[in-house]
Image: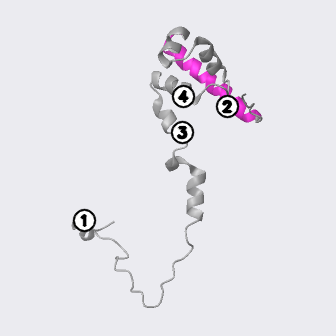
């Protein structure tokens, strides 16, 4: 039994994804039958994928991207390095200040790095 996506915006996003997939296939002049065979699904499953049906597996989408030469789009999806919200939350979690405890020695890192500092491979 499949669950229906309640969010209208999520359904629209899936429909847009399906339409984009179909457009990419057509631009590459790949027939429906050939594309379905290459990604390992039936033609009816491919039609559902291109319509944005939420019941089609993510594996089928991944294989479609592979065949289209766009696999990196799947692996880059929600990449932590480009997740602006996650990066902002990480930044907000940083300490506001760092107190030196009694007995701690001051840092030996120079306040301003010079070209000489990098010569030994220790400058940052």
What residue is drawn where x is 51% and y is 23%? Answer: 64
- For marks 2 and 3, the one nearer the N-term is 2
Give left or right: position of 6 versus 85.
right
Given contact means CB atoms under 8 Å apart, are the residues at marks 4 and 2 in contact?
Answer: no
Q: Nearer the viewer, residue 8 or 96?
A: 8
- For marks 2 and 1, the one nearer the N-term is 2
- For marks 4 and 2, the one nearer the N-term is 2
The residue wearing badge 4 is 59
- Span of residues in magenta: 8-31
The residue wearing badge 3 is 77
**Separation of marks 2 and 3 at Cα, in angstroms:** 14 Å
- For marks 3 and 4, the one nearer the N-term is 4
Question: Which is closer to the viewer, label 2 or label 1?
Answer: 2
In reply to whether residue 23 is colored magenta, the answer given is: yes
CA neighbours of label 1 inside 10 A, class few (<14), some (14 to 19), many (20+)? few
Taking 27 as reference, is 99 above or below it? below
Taking 106 as reference, is 45 above or below it? above
Quadrant of residue 78 within the rendered picture: top right
Q: Name the dominant secondary structure of the magenta segment.
A: helix
**Separation of marks 4 and 2 at Cα, in angstroms:** 18 Å
**Separation of marks 3 and 1 at Cα, in angstroms:** 36 Å
Taking 91 as reference, is 112 above or below it? below
User: Disc 2 on helix, strand or loop?
Assistant: helix
The residue wearing badge 2 is 13
CA neighbours of label 3 inside 10 A, class few (<14), some (14 to 19), many (20+)? few
What residue is drawn where x is 67% and y is 28%? Answer: 54
CA neighbours of label 4 inside 10 A, class few (<14), some (14 to 19), many (20+)? few
The residue wearing badge 1 is 121
Q: Position of residue 25 (x, y in %)?
A: 53, 16
Given contact means CB atoms under 8 Å apart, are the residues at marks 3 and 1 in contact?
Answer: no
């Amino acid at each position: 039994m499949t669950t229906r996506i309640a969010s209208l915006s999520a359904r629209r996003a899936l429909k847009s994804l399906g339409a984009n997939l179909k457009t990419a296939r057509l631009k590459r002049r790949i027939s429906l039958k050939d594309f379905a065979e290459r990604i390992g699904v039936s033609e009816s499953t491919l039609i559902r994928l291109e319509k944005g049906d939420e019941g089609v597996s993510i594996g089928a989408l991944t294989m479609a991207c592979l065949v289209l030469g766009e696999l990196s789009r799947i692996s880059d999806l929600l990449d932590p390095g480009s997740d602006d919200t996650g990066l902002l939350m990480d930044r907000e979690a940083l300490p506001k200040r760092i107190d030196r405890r009694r007995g701690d020695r001051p840092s030996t890192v120079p306040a301003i790095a010079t070209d000489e500092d990098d010569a030994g491979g220790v400058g940052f």
